[in-house]
Image (cartoon, helix red, strand yellow):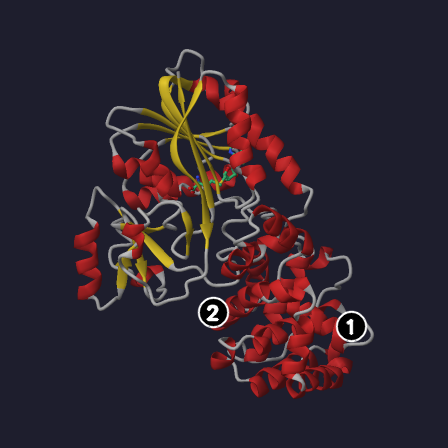
Amino acid sequence: MTRKPSSRAVPPAARPHEPRLSTLHLAPESLGFALDCAAQAVGAVRLGAALPAALSTVFASLPEGSAAASHGAVQDIAYRTMRRLGVAEWLVARLVRKPPPPHVAHVLACAFALLVDDEASAAYTPFTVVDQAVGAIGARREFAFAKGLTNAVLRNFLRERSALISESQRDDVARWNYPRWWIEAVRNAWPDAWQDMLEAGNTQGPLTLRVNARRSSVDAYLQTLHDHQIAATQVGLQAIRLEAPLPVDRIPGFRDGVVSVQDAGAQRAAQLLGVANGMRVLDACAAPGGKTGHLLELADIDLVALESDRSRAQRIGENLRRLSLAADIRIGDAGNPSAWHDPSEPRFDRVLADVPCSASGIVRRHPDIRWLRRAADIASLVVEQRRILAALWPLVKTGGELLYVTCSILPDEGELQAVWFGNNHQDAVRLDAPGQLLPAVARAPADPSAGSRAGWTTGSNPDHDGFFYARFQKR
Ligand SMILES: C[S@@+](CC[C@H](N)C(=O)[O-])C[C@H]1O[C@@H](n2cnc3c(N)ncnc32)[C@H](O)[C@@H]1O
């Protein structure tokens, strides 16, 4: 997975317009408590923190026991709100005349995210949402003055729900729930598919497993799932999609490394590298080690896993330990090999360059990314990707291969980079690879033969996130 734009949580005390909140007197199992916590996390994302880090900060601030009691609901509301933030913030601006304090606005946004979502109303009935949001605002003494406002605004919305929702659809940000620049970028890049792709990013991705080829096979593992009454379908060479998500501790064999959780599109990387026993392989941007583990499952290779972020690099070791596999893990900048690669060391048969990117292809799993990225980030990422590619190429043996990967749907980071690389490296021969994999919305009931008809590869498909793959061989 791509590193998030910011892995920092903004500490509550450092938030510019949000003084430390008073104690919240609500039962941790209540929806009001969950709305309050989710609103804090949404506020932190709006100040630049990645959602997982923001949620960790919120949970760490709770009294003992409260985090466990509220965890599932807080996470669910915060993630849903990221997917509906455009319309939720539009409704706050439309229905509240004078901008409320940020925390009140974020509680309202979380409540609206639940109220506009037909699927959410199965879990959270509209009048309970209103009642609990009012309770959450009233439970903090500094915001108690806004109880009446919260009640009036949410009830007004329920009264005029369909008119307000149709009015909101005239605004692109509210319609699609992405920043305007992002909508423009996807529309320009994919004039025939942009709507489907934006919509796909607002769904929850499927839970896909990778079967460890050293430990089992897809057929044998499908039988295991069947024996546990877990419905699943093969969606790639080693990929199995569960019909309904499950916590990992309920997935048979997960703890022992029989399977890993990995998107079907991400599983293409190790397969495309075509590793064979005895090869020397560099995984140049390796954390948290999803593709590292897959490569080691496929052959007995001598693998160097490089990562620039020391704390993320730890996760490579943790992931490999679960799989009982090992790599030579190094900390360093892929763009500066002299700092971590001795010139006397042999060069590599295969190099995987899973470079930092916009992560625009994996928004369904990381719905906060769209609100954290800025339009200007793309140009800097393009420069960084080129720097890394140019530095890695001399490490490839003659006859060896480099695989360029991004989890982006933007051509600037995909095909245009591949063309740039080919034009600037006369000794590079471009080999077959899927190119751009585009995410799509799952519409019909899952068709088990669809994957094989598509060769598990290119085009739009609900079974994979958005990725770009280009493969080069050194002459
Ligand atoms: C797309 S993620 C890699 C995902 C990983 N390959 C996997 O499958 O689990 C990119 C990683 O590259 C790291 N990174 C960013 N810049 C780097 C650099 N200059 N050198 C090495 N690693 C870098 C990021 O910290 C991040 O962990």
Q: Is residue 380 above or below residue 193?
A: above
Identify the disc placed on residue 100.
1
Q: Quick one: 398 or 414, which is closer to the camera?
A: 414
Q: Position of residue 182 (x, y in %)?
A: 63, 52
Rate crowding at label 2 as few (under 14), some (14 to 19) or many (20 or more) other CA atoms within 10 Å: few
Q: Residue at x 52, y 38 (%)?
A: 414
**Residue 72, numbered label:** 2
User: Are the two marked residues, 2 and 1, in contact with CB atoms closer than 8 angstroms?
Assistant: no
Examine the image and state in which quarter residue 42 appears: bottom right
**Separation of marks 2 and 1 at Cα, in angstroms:** 28 Å
Q: Amino acid at mark 1?
A: Pro
Q: Which residue occupies the foreground of this view, 171 or 155? A: 171
On the image, the x and y values in percent for residue 377 come to 65, 42
Residue 368 place in picture, x, y as percent? 58, 57
Q: Callout 2, which amino acid?
A: Gly
Circle 1 Cα neighbour tier, 10 Å, few/some/many (<14 / 14–19 / ≥20): some
First reached walking from the N terminus: tag 2 or tag 1: 2
Closer mark to the observer between disc 2 and disc 1: 1
Q: Which residue extends farthest top?
A: 344
384 shown above or below 191: above
Task: State yes or no: Cβ of the residue under disc 2 lies below 8 Å from any atom of ligand 1.
Answer: no
Residue at 52% over, 29% down = 419
